[in-house]
Image (cartoon, helix red, strand yellow):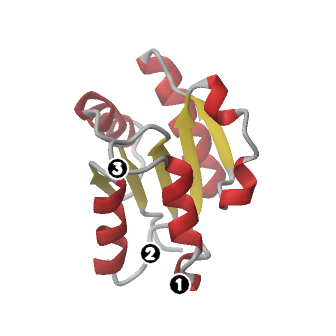
Amino acid sequence: MRNKTVLFVSNNENECNLFREFLSENNRACPLIVANTCIDALFVLMEMGTPPDILITEFNMPDMTGFELAEAIRNNQDYDTIHIFVIGSGEEIGKDYTQYGVESCFVKPTTTESLSAIVSYIVNQYS
């Protein structure tokens, strides 16, 4: 079984670093790709030979929302296998996210521990 690839979309450098640290400290053999905008994430997807297994994006991004990114990804059948997750505020994740092809939404973590719990859940569930 091949290692799972994770694409993390965030314009917050601290969150990207925490995500990287979590995967390395917990001996996750998950290659991590980081995109700083949703548009960058779409370009990364086009350039990849094989799509990532997991995509985690923040809801509020400068160029489009996490739901809009998920919808754009789901419009391409080549990306049907990607497990998509969105991190946002309680108000955002209260919407019907499944209509965008999102598997689950999480409240944006406010501590390192809560970010670790979310990442651990997702990686363990789909690795």
Q: Nearer the viewer, residue 95 or 25?
A: 95
Q: At 29% from the left edge and 70% from the top edge, which residue is drawn?
A: 43
Number of dots carrying numbers = 3
Q: Which residue is mark 1?
A: 78
Mark 3 belongs to which amino acid? Asp
- Residue 127 in sight in this render: no
| Dot 2 or dot 3, earlier in sequence | 2
User: Which quadrant holds the N terminus?
Assistant: bottom right
Mark 1 belongs to which amino acid? Asp
Q: Residue 21, position in %: x, y?
A: 30, 35
- Residue 33 in sight in this render: yes
Single out the residue that lies furthest toward the front: 63
| Dot 3 or dot 1, earlier in sequence | 3
Q: Nearer the viewer, residue 94 or 2?
A: 94
Q: At 67% from the left edge and 61% from the top edge, which residue is drawn?
A: 101
- Neighbor class of circle 2 (other Cα within 10 Å; few <14, some 14-19, many 20+) is some
Q: Callout 1: helix, strand or loop?
A: helix
Q: Which residue is mark 2?
A: 51
Q: Which residue is mark 3?
A: 63
Identify the disc placed on residue 61: none
| Dot 1 or dot 2, earlier in sequence | 2
- Neighbor class of circle 1 (other Cα within 10 Å; few <14, some 14-19, many 20+) is few
Relative vertical location of residue 71 with respect to residue 2 in this rendering, above or below? above
**Contact check, label 1 and label 2, Cβ < 8 Å:** yes
Relative vertical location of residue 80 with respect to residue 55 in this rendering, above or below? below
